Amino acid sequence: MDRNTPRDKYGYAFDPKAVANLGKVVEETGAGIVISSSWKCMGLSQMEDMWDERNLPGNVVGITPNSVSDELLVDTDIDSMELFHIRGEEIKEWLTKHGKHVSHYVIIDDMDNMLPEQQSHFVQTNPEVGITVDDANKAIVILNKE
């Protein structure tokens, strides 16, 4: 982010190119969006409000649970493997609870902290750029697999 990146009550705006690329994924697959990033700390209704107010593509249909307790963060060595797969565990938990109607899913993230069984559903983005056209195309292939 540079000093010229627009801000609103939610923080810095997302890169318009990355938003357009997400729009392409949603348009070509009909996918709903489940937030697993740190943005989920705002809660589902705030995420839905932000999506509407920013006119972002698709619909937020859920947020993953937060499985990182304060005690775990304090008591665990930051290099520990226990922390490494937390996001993947949260996604797995969401899919266990809500995934009976999910036939295909893709995980789009800039950090590779997914479980081994999630790797075929994972598209890693560059944190400096966000979702590129190539990332969007990979996501579309994953979501449209029979």
Image (cartoon, helix red, strand yellow):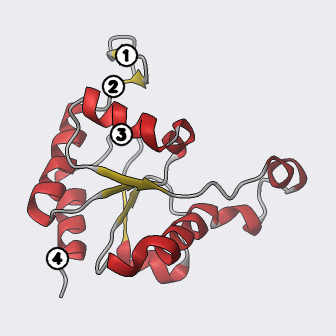
Q: Residue at x 77, y 52 (%)?
A: 69
Q: Is residue 115 above or below residue 26?
A: below
- Observer-side mark, 4 or 3, equals 3
Q: CA distance from mark 4 to mark 3?
A: 25 Å
Characterize the local packing of mark 4: few (<14), some (14-19) or many (20 or more) Cα atoms within 10 angstroms.
some
Q: CA distance from mark 3 to mark 1?
A: 18 Å
Tag 1–tag 4 contact (CB < 8 Å): no
* Residue under label 1: 7
Where residue 91 appears, x then y in whole percent?
51, 67
Query: 138 left or right of 95?
Result: left
Q: CA distance from mark 4 to mark 2?
A: 29 Å
Tag 1–tag 2 contact (CB < 8 Å): yes
Q: Residue at x 24, y 41 (%)?
A: 18
The secondary structure type at the circle numbered 2 is loop
Query: 35 left or right of 97?
Result: left
Characterize the local packing of mark 2: few (<14), some (14-19) or many (20 or more) Cα atoms within 10 angstroms.
some
- Observer-side mark, 3 or 2, equals 3
**Image quarter for residue 127?**
top left
Q: CA distance from mark 1 to mark 4?
A: 34 Å
- Earlier in the chain: of badge 4 and badge 3, it is 3
* Residue under label 3: 48
> In the rendering, which numbered label is found on residue 13?
2
**Image quarter for residue 108?**
bottom left
* Residue under label 4: 144
Question: What's under tag 3, amino acid-wise?
Answer: Glu
- Earlier in the chain: of badge 1 and badge 2, it is 1
Question: What's under tag 4, amino acid-wise?
Answer: Asn
- Earlier in the chain: of badge 4 and badge 2, it is 2
Q: Residue at x 22, y 62 (%)?
A: 31
Question: What's under tag 1, amino acid-wise?
Answer: Arg
